[in-house]
Amino acid sequence: MGFQGVVSRAIDARGLLDCAALTSLHHSSSEPVVNNNANDDNCVLMPWVGFGTYRLGKRQSRTATLEALKSGYRQIDTAFIYGGQTTELEVGKALQDALQMGVIQSREDVFITTKQWREYHGYDASMKCLELSLERLGVDYVDMWMMHWPGPCFESRDKRQTVSSEDAATEDDPWLHAKEGMGVNEIASLRADTWRAMEDAYRRGKTRSIAVSNFTIKHLETLKETATLWPPAVNQIESHPYYPQNDLIDYCQKEGIIVQAYAALGGQDGTKAKWKALGGKLFESAPVLEASERLHKTPAQILLRWSLQRNCAIVPKTCDPDRMKENSDIFDFELSEEEMKAIANLSEGVGDGEGRLCWRTEKLRMLDIIP
């Protein structure tokens, strides 16, 4: 079985690379390097702080991405499905804008992540998905290609709603509208076929690393049984103080999988009622505000730094140029052990899975029900 090795290197305060080798992010500004083959010295550097493009509008996808590049970001995180399949194209335009303006000198200056969508699970379909992504982005390869979701695609757009039926069992079945061939007894095998396509895409130079997103320990263990390249370079997961996913992060770190936290600030999917039930927004929590006051940093910077000190990479998103700089200015201070614990304790009393804020309209959002 091949191995995607992980090492670290130092970066400056904006998250850009320098050449000093480090062994850990903790208490430093290190940067993970991923390598899909133990015998390959051509390591792939991934900035700890990337720029996320989830739920950016069509125009913003281009303008905000360009502004992020101007602000010093050198990782752009996007996905096939973002923006109703429009975001990749706009990100590609922003890259061309940045090249023409001299913001970046070459395509190689930017680490591009995109994600395969569940509609394209399977070997041939996944290869098609990647080719479409490359075409939209206007590049010959991406730096990281992720399997976005471990579950199925659905035939009906009504999958998010309870289906009217006299049969209560059928009515409550979250797999009711799963696409043919993606049923509960088929999805694990289909994921293995998708990963095989990703392995081949890596070997053909279409992607410099391969990764997963939203995978549980169970999904990773199942995938490991058939993988010829292991481990995935990254597992991108929802993680924040209300939903820390401690066991999954521990597992990934033991396996050599870098964890990249999305929604590190709490995300955009939480409702007012949900925030109230959890005790209020993370920005307004006492331990975050206390650390903010002591360190003269914003609550957002405190939360992002909390993730970094847990050895989690992050992909915050904003359209505001000042916020972009603020979100990356998190390498010149450190949370104390007591502050780390106080923020972590925000999850106390939150029921198992109750802190999950993202994918709130997805019937299979509680991922453990996906084999």
Image (cartoon, rainbow, N blue to C red):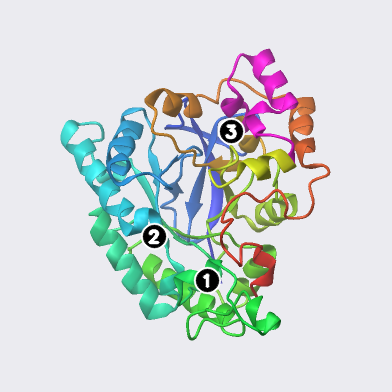
Q: Amino acid at mark 2?
A: Ile
Q: Position of residue 36 (x, y in %)?
A: 48, 60
Secondary structure at numbered mark 1:
helix
State the residue at coordinates (54%, 66%). Answer: 160
Q: Which of the 4 image quarters holds residue 293?
A: top right
Residue drawn at 55 percent across, 30 percent down = 29
Q: Quadrant of the N terminus?
A: bottom right
Which numbered disc, 1 or 3, marks the residue that appears first in the sequence? Answer: 1
**Residue beneath the point at 32% across and 43% down:** 61
In the displayed structure, does residue 283 sit left or right of residue 354?
Answer: left
- Residue 304 marker: 3
Instruction: Give neighbour class at mark 2: few <14, some 14-19, many 20+ (Cα, 10 Å).
Output: some
Q: Nearer the viewer, mark 2 or mark 3?
A: 2
Within the magenta stretch, is there residue 285? Answer: yes
Nearer the observer, 166 or 257? 166
* Residue stretch in magenta: 278-303
Left/right placement of residue 315 relative to residue 142 reads right
- Please, what is the three-letter code of the amino acid marked with disc 1? Lys
Marks 1 and 3, how far apart at CA: 34 Å
Q: Please say whether residue 284 is one of the residues in the magenta stretch.
A: yes
Across and down, in percent, residue 128 comes to 32, 73
- Secondary structure beneath dot 3 equals helix
Q: Main secondary structure of the magenta part?
A: helix
Q: Which residue is mark 1?
A: 159
Q: Does residue 204 lie above or below 318 as drawn? A: below
Callout 1 touching callout 3 (CB < 8 Å): no
Distance, label 2 to label 1, CA atoms, is: 17 Å
Q: CA distance from mark 2 to mark 3?
A: 25 Å
